[in-house]
Image (spheres, rainbow, N blue to C red):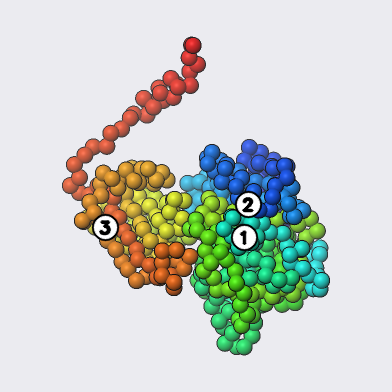
Amino acid sequence: MNARTAMTDTAQDLHDFYAAYADSWPDDVLTIDQPASRDEDVTATVWSLAAQGRHPLLRFNRVQNVQRPLLTNLFASRERVGRLLGGVGAAGIHAEYQARSRNLLKPELVGDGKVLQQVRSSGINLYRDIPSIRHFASDRCPYITNSILISEFDGISNVSYHRSMVHSDSEIATSLHSRGHLWRMLRTAEAQGKPLPVAMVIGAHPLFMLAAAARLPYGVDERHVAGGLMGAALQVVRTPQYGISVPANAEFVLEGVIDPALRAEEGPFGEFTGYSSDRSTNNVFRVETLMQRSDAWLLDVVGGNSAEHLNLGRIPRESEMVEKLKERFPGVTAVHYPNSGTHFHAYIALRQSRPGEARQVMLGLLGWDPYLKTVFAVDEDVDITRDEEVLWAMATHFQPHQDLFVVDGLPGSPLDPSSSADGTTSRLGIDATRGPRFDGLRARISPEAMQRAHTLIHTPQRQ
């Protein structure tokens, strides 16, 4: 199996994907065979590697109480995400994601799938049956971080991520704090006096996971996006009780209902902000059916402000924003959401053709992306993938009395610890471009000199 087949395997199987990826890029996979605690060891390993500038795909074979291989950190590397999308490279992710995601493919219902190898509707004990780990000391308890809820109700379908923790033998406490499409569907069900049928997918092919993070209009199905990303229709089977279409080769699927009347405490949990948040809608998912493959793995998403958590949530949104900005403002040359800003900062590089254009571009992005609080605009020769370059541009180009603006009273993320309880926030634009009357010439080193320096550094020296 070659590298490209590894990314586009029509079996849509996590195990096949992992085997092919490890064969094609063995240096990008790290296997941990030593015993590891379920309490924080996985997260601590990811943080320790990140401090060294390393973001490998991790496989833990002996995590306490998990009793199966645990994969994590899959989305921590943009180079790896580029390989998932056919080997486009990190710089090509936005365009490739948009091109593929627009090719909506209806899921293909198949007669059988590995997730049907074990199906139970009685004797379920979630504490025993569903593996989970504690990511941070400040977390309330172990959490399921890769919990993707699928619902089909009243002619509408939705697929989305929601943090989840086992609350009882048959119940999971979860939060719909984004108050997105699943929240809207729950309100519709409540108005009809009904619970909302849902299926929770825990572990599936990485491109299904990426599609589940897509930002789509209400009623557009993320499973169709998964087919576009894969280049083949998502293969699905139906859950036995409510007939919800789920990936045929998923690791685990839980089927049941969210009862609008039930509440359970959950949180704090380490969120993308870098803080453990107890802001929650405290919803309860009552599990009625457990489906799993006989050799199921735990596919974990690293929590907190990890590179994986940020990339997985951000790449679909970034891709949409970059496309919108470049279509509306041809002078935009690059857009980047830095990890240092979680989901709240964005950098824009542009070639201005008239005064005020940078401000107009920033207003556009601040209006389109509800998570953003601060946008920095810089000139096209500034490398916006490096925080120090953006800060240098701010230090040398920015005049506070004329180059910033603030808009207040806008909806933002309810998980922002500095926002109001309902998520209301203000937004800031910082114009760190040089402007038309800037007096200065950037100091540069020629490529030839840099090459000579490379030779000098790497030539063996006599002692």
Residue at the extreme top: 462
Question: Which quarter of the picture shows residue 181?
Answer: bottom right
Residue at the disc numbered 2:
40
Residue at the disc numbered 1:
145
The span from disc 1 to disc 2 (Cα, nearest Å) is 13 Å
Query: Element at badge 2?
Result: loop
Image marks 1 and 3: residues in contact by CB distance under 8 Å:
no
Pair 1/2: label in front: 2
Residue at the disc numbered 3:
404
The span from disc 1 to disc 3 (Cα, nearest Å) is 38 Å
Of pointers 3 and 2, the one earlier in the residue sequence: 2
Rendered residue at 46%/68% (across/down)? 414
- Which quadrant would the N terminus be assigned to in this image? top right
Q: In this view, does 137 lie above or below 450?
A: below
User: Residue 87: in sight, yes or no?
Assistant: no
Of pointers 1 and 2, the one earlier in the residue sequence: 2
Image coordinates for residue 226, horizontal then vertical, percent:
61, 61
Query: Element at badge 3?
Result: strand
